[in-house]
Image (cartoon, rainbow, N blue to C red):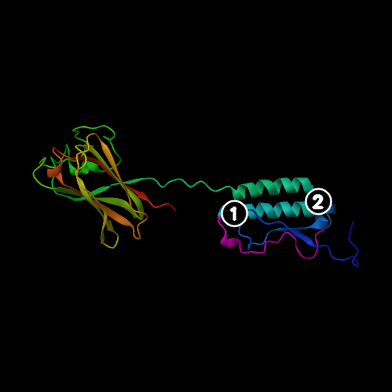
Amino acid sequence: MLVPSSSPPVLGKTLVLGGLAASLVAVTVSSAALATHAPRQAVDPCAVSFDLASLSQPDRALVARRSLACADVEHGRISTAEYQKQVSAIDAAWTTPAVIAAPAMQWAASVRGFSSQYTTASWAADRVLGAPDVFPAHGDNVNAWASLGADDKDEWLEVGYAQPTRISAIEIFETYNPGAISAVEMITASGEHVTAYQGTPRAGGSAKKLHIDVGCTAEPIVAINVRLASRQVAGWNELDAIGVSPCAQ
């Protein structure tokens, strides 16, 4: 039934969108429409009063679903109970935090330099590239990098990454006589060398994964330089892989 023009206006009821700040004014459905499915008033009660471009794509989709439900109840296509059921489901989706997958580890893709290598094939510097293929096993293995001499001098290895990115952590896999790593440097896209780790070399026994948290770097990291105090940890100190964790988006 139409409300006579002489009747006082019916105040609207604001439905606040769950999961959004209170400043994002919600889709509004008039009390008269909820009670009687009356025709839409001159002011669209289902209009959205904020900039959709400011929302993420999933949130824009939820706003659209809210608006459609509002229009359906305004025009009597659904009941008030069905409208409330739909809104509850939308709000539940809105307030459930999104699960963000951890970025995939990026593995060294190139060798930029090294102090020495045992041979150009077995125990070569390029054996450190890619994901671990020795770890978690421990022992003298041709698939890991080893220096030419065991304990005659300090050694170093520098690897590069195919897709330089800001990183939050470094992981170095030591698979034979671990514990010789004395320092780790990050090389940024602008060429700056940033110390990520300094430690006291100490024999570590079995295979080891050295995890280094670096927060989130200000610049993309193009390379990692690893230094070994080989004379302080007896035997060949072999490295299997060097990975970096991109910062969470």
Q: Is residue 21 left or right of residue 3?
A: left
Q: Main secondary structure of the magenta part?
A: loop
Q: Residues within 10 Å of mark 2 (few under 14, many from 20)?
A: some
* Residue bounds of the magenta highlight: 39-56
Q: Earlier in the sequence, mark 1 or mark 2?
A: 1
Q: Is residue 16 left or right of residue 8?
A: left
Magenta stretch containing residue 23, yes or no? no
Name the quarter where the N terminus is drawn: bottom right
The three-letter amino acid code for the residue at tag 1 is Asp
The residue nearer to you, when weighing 112 against 240, is 240
Magenta stretch containing residue 44, yes or no? yes
| Residue occupied by mark 2 | 76
Q: Do tag 1 and tag 2 residues touch (Cβ < 8 Å)?
A: no
Alpha carbon of mark 1 to alpha carbon of mark 2: how far?
26 Å
| Residue occupied by mark 1 | 59
Residue at x 39% of width, y 52% of height: 247
Residue at x 63% of width, y 52% of height: 62
Q: Is residue 230 left or right of residue 196?
A: left
Q: Position of residue 220 (x, y in %)?
A: 33, 57
The residue nearer to you, when weighing 235 against 85, is 235
The residue nearer to you, when weighing 182 against 114, is 182
Residue 78 seen in render: no
Q: Position of residue 13 (x, y in %)?
A: 76, 58
Residue 211's label in the rendered image is: none
Q: Is residue 19 above or below residue 41?
A: above
Q: Secondary structure at mark 1?
A: helix
Q: Is residue 213 left or right of residue 34?
A: left
The three-letter amino acid code for the residue at tag 2 is Gly
